Image (cartoon, rainbow, N blue to C red):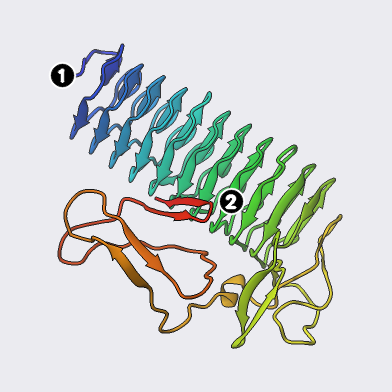
C-alpha cells in the first residue's frame, strides 16, 4: 500500500481515487490546512487518529464516499470544524470526539447524503454541535451533543433525515433546530437545559415527526413551531420550561399520534390517540384512561386534544414474562450475517430497541433488521 502523502500544508492527504486505504493510529496536529483530508477517495478507513489543533478541519472529506471514520479525536480546530463532509455520501462517522472546535463539531454539507453519524461526543463548539446543510437521508443517532454555542443539532434545507436517541442539552441557544427541512424524524432525543428552546421547527419545516422526546428546563420554550404545517408532534414530555412548554407562530400542526395506539395505564389497557405530556396541564381525567378530558391549549394557536396525564414512558411499561419464541435461525459467536425469526403471539408496538454484546464471546450486533408484511426497518 502506498503511504498517504505528507506535506507542510496538510497533515495526511489522500486524493484522486486513492481508495481502499487504512489511515490508523496517526497524529496529525498543528497543520496549516486540515489534519486528515480525503478528496475523491472512496472505501477508506480512518480510525484511531489524533487530528487536533489544525488550522482548518480536523478531518475533511470532499467528494469521497463509502468511508469509515471511527474512534478519532478531531478537536480544537483554529478556524473550522472537527469533522466535515462536503458532497460525500454513504460514509460512517462513529465513536469520535469532536470537542472545542472553532465553528462546528461535525458537518454534512452540499448534498452529503445517506451518511451515519452515531455514538460521537461533540461539546463546546463555537457554533453548532452537529449541522446538516442541503443533505438528505442521513442518520444521526446516539450522540452526546452538549455545551455548544448556538445549536446542538441543526438542519438547514435537509430532508428525510432521522435524528434519534441524541442528548442535545446545555447549549447557549437551541437543542435541536430544523430550518426549511421536511420529512425528518426527530425521536427519542433529550433536549434539556438549553438557554433558549429545546426543539425548534423554523419556517417551511413541514411534514416532520417529533415523537418520544423530552424537553425540559429550557430557558425559553420546550418546543416552538414557526410558520410550518402538518408536523406530527406526539408522545413527548414538555416540562418546566422558562417561557412556555410550547409556542406556535403561524403554524397548523397535529399534536397527537396520527393513529390510535394501544397502551397501558394504571394496569388497564386502552386504545386511543395519544398526545403529549405537559407538566402545566390543569385538566382532569374523569374516566382515568390517562388522557385529559380537556384540550391543552398551545399559546398563539393549536391544541393538543389528547394530553397525557403522566410522562409518555409510563404508558408503555414493559410487560413481565413476555417470551419470544425464536422459531429458527443461527446465533453463533463468530463473524458473519446470521438470521433469526422471532414470532410474538400478540401485536407489539416497539418504541425502543436495545442491542447488547454476547457475554464472554466479544461478539456484538452491527444492526437488526425487521421485515415482512410490507415492513422493512433497520436499527443500527
Coordinates of residue 308 in the picture (x, y in percent): 70, 73
Which quadrant does the N terminus fall into? top left
Query: Residue 232 location in percent, x, y?
Result: 70, 54
Mark 2 surroundings within 10 Å by alpha-carbon count, few (fewer than 14), some (14 through 19), many (20 or more): many
The answer to the question of whether label 2 and label 1 lie on touching residues, with beta carbons closer than 8 A, is no
Residue in the foreground of this view, choosing between 338 and 10: 338
Residue 65: where, in percent of width, then height? 38, 26
Mark 1: few/some/many CA within 10 Å (<14, 14-19, 20+): few
Q: Is residue 291 visible?
A: yes
Secondary structure of the residue carrying tag 2 is: strand
- Tell me what residue is drawn at x 31 percent, y 34 percent: 68
**Residue 132 to residue 281: above or below:** above
Side of 49 relative to 84 (left or right) = left
Considering the numbered disc 1 on the image, is that residue within a helix, a strand or a loop? Answer: loop
Comparing labels 2 and 1, the label whose residue is closer to the camera? 2
| Quarter of the view holding residue 187 | bottom right
Q: Which residue is mark 1?
A: 3
Identify the residue at horizontal 64%, vertical 63% (top origin). 236
Q: Which residue is mark 2?
A: 186
Splitting the image into 4 quarters, where does residue 202 fall?
top right
Decide if residue 78 is on the left or right side of residue 359. Answer: right
Asked whether, in this view, residue 8 is left or right of residue 341, the answer is left
First reached walking from the N terminus: tag 2 or tag 1? 1
| Residue at the image position 18 percent from the left and 60 percent from the top | 332
- Residue, x 60% and y 76% (percent of image)? 315
| Relative to 82, 26 lies left or right | left
State whether residue 220 appears in this view. Answer: no
Amino acid at each position: 500500500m502506498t503511504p498517504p502523502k505528507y506535506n507542510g500544508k496538510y497533515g495526511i492527504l489522500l486524493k484522486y481515487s486513492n481508495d481502499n486505504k487504512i489511515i490508523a493510529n496517526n497524529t496529525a496536529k498543528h497543520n496549516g490546512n486540515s489534519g486528515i483530508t480525503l478528496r475523491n477517495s472512496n472505501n477508506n478507513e480512518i480510525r484511531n487518529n489524533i487530528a487536533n489543533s489544525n488550522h482548518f478541519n480536523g478531518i475533511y472529506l470532499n467528494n469521497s464516499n463509502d468511508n469509515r471514520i471511527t474512534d478519532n479525536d478531531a478537536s480544537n480546530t483554529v478556524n473550522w470544524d472537527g469533522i466535515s463532509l462536503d458532497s460525500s455520501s454513504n460514509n460512517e462517522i462513529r465513536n469520535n470526539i469532536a470537542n472545542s472546535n472553532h465553528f462546528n463539531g461535525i458537518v454534512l454539507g452540499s448534498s452529503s447524503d445517506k451518511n451515519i453519524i452515531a455514538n460521537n461526543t461533540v461539546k463546546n463548539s463555537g457554533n453548532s454541535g452537529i449541522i446538516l446543510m442541503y443533505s438528505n437521508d442521513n442518520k444521526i443517532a446516539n450522540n452526546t451533543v452538549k455545551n455548544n454555542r448556538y445549536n446542538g443539532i441543526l438542519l438547514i434545507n435537509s430532508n428525510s433525515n432521522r435524528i434519534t436517541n441524541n442528548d442535545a442539552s446545555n447549549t447557549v441557544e437551541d437543542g435541536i433546530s430544523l430550518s426549511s427541512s421536511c420529512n425528518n424524524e426527530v425521536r427519542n432525543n433529550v433536549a434539556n437545559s438549553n438557554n433558549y428552546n429545546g426543539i425548534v421547527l423554523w419556517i417551511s419545516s413541514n411534514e416532520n415527526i417529533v415523537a418520544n422526546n423530552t424537553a425540559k428546563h429550557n430557558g425559553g420554550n420546550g418546543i416552538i413551531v414557526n410558520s410550518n404545517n402538518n408536523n406530527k408532534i406526539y408522545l413527548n414530555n414538555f416540562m418546566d420550561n422558562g417561557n412556555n412548554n410550547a409556542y406556535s407562530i403561524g403554524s397548523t400542526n397535529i399534536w397527537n399520534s396520527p393513529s390510535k395506539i394501544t397502551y397501558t395505564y394504571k394496569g388497564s389497557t386502552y386504545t386511543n390517540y395519544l398526545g403529549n405530556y405537559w407538566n402545566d396541564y390543569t385538566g382532569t381525567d374523569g374516566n382515568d384512561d390517562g388522557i385529559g378530558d380537556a384540550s391543552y391549549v398551545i399559546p398563539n394557536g393549536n391544541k393538543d386534544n389528547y394530553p397525557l396525564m403522566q410522562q409518555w414512558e409510563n404508558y408503555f411499561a414493559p410487560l413481565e414474562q413476555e417470551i419470544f419464541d425464536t422459531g429458527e435461525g443461527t446465533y453463533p459467536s463468530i463473524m458473519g450475517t446470521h438470521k433469526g425469526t422471532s414470532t410474538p403471539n400478540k401485536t407489539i408496538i416497539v418504541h425502543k430497541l436495545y442491542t447488547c454484546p454476547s457475554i464472554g464471546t466479544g461478539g456484538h450486533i452491527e444492526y437488526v433488521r425487521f421485515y415482512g408484511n410490507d415492513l422493512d426497518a433497520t436499527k443500527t
